[in-house]
Image: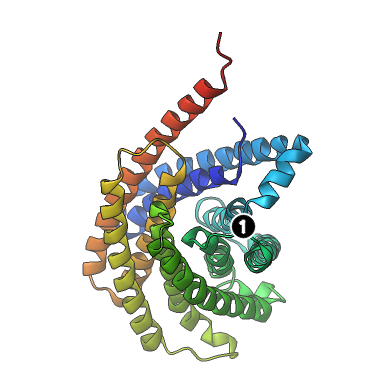
Amino acid sequence: MRITTEWFPIVLGTMVLSLTSWIDYTVFNMSLALQVGKVIYFIALALFALILIGWAYGYRDINNIKEDLSSINRVAFSAFIAVLIFVSGFFYTVYISYSPTTVIDLSYLYFFGYALAFVINVVTWVKIYLGQKVTPSYALLVPSIALSADVVLGAPILPPFSYVLKDVGTIYILMLLALGITVLQFVFLGSVSLLSHLQGTRAYPTVMIPLGAASIIGINVLSFPAYNYLGLFDVPEKAALAIGVSLFDFELWNLVLGLFIAVNRIREPPSLISWAYVFPTGIAMFSAFMLFQMTGIYTFVDFIIALNIVVVLLYSFSVLKTFQFMKAMMKNSTPQK
């Protein structure tokens, strides 16, 4: 059994569990939730290290490198590494340290993650255009989401310690560039993927990936008014809020659609693909959290509670399916006597 890029969403799903705990602490003032979230964060970092080492270890055989490079989905899923870099940096500011020195160090991590996400995005699209047997699917949107996920780390390292950074304007511009790329790629590739699905490519779990795309776009838009103090652009807060609420409506619709499909196909053979549900739901919950912070409307708290429950259920289901998948893989790899 070889570890491939399909395993990285396990780490991301675990980070989402930490996110739910942090949001519970922030919204409901549950001090225990903060400590639980911190423990989960360190568990996720350990998982990240183990899976990253296992993934790299598989490349001792050059044939495995060729195999993964020939698979456009595995190339696209490698963008999860960039997302994990951004998310790990964000949680570092939450659980460990948030100071001027930390911000400087995290800015280097931000540029590295951004460069990685951008390179993987370009490589994926080169393969889309030049590949001979490319089946369009929402899974190919992962590099687009990864690029705009830079806001997860970019937002915390701007205010209030942005005065220690020389590249504040550059980070803000990069965030805007990433958003533009993500929006247009979402429109173009999302439409083609839907047509491909209707014509017979039934990639059911990836129906949740547009939820992740819409959520990360919404989070970007909601974040931008906070940077008006830089004097580069003026993003009206009410306009950003209106766009954020509209996108959140789409997120809820996509979530309901995805859950109906998940229930309909719950008896499928075990695989890692069920993790495709966890991360997008977690981003939607963060979007609801931001909307509550900006509006004070307690309806969004109800959404946070509901999404919190959904995340825990999806995570538990995915863990079960993962163990079943590993058991089946080890059984198949065991030589028959």
Question: Which residue is at 54% across, 42% downward?
Answer: 7
The colour scheme used here is rainbow
For mark 1, give the secondary structure: helix
Q: Is residue 279 left or right of residue 100?
A: left
Q: Is residue 209 left or right of residue 136?
A: left
Question: Which residue is at 68% across, 61% downward?
Answer: 116
Q: Which residue is mark 1?
A: 82
Please state, as top left, top right, bottom left or bottom right, where the N terminus lies in the image: top right
- Counting from the top left corner in percent of width and height, residue 304 is at 29, 59
Please state, as top left, top right, bottom left or bottom right, where the C terminus lies in the image: top right
Tell which residue pokes out farthest to the top in this image.
337
- Counting from the top left corner in percent of width and height, residue 86 is at 58, 59
User: Residue 256 versus residue 93: which sits nearer the camera?
Assistant: 256
* Three-letter code, disc 1: Ala
- Counting from the top left corner in percent of width and height, residue 41 is at 50, 45
How many residues crowd mark 1 within 10 Å: few (<14), some (14–19), many (20+)? many
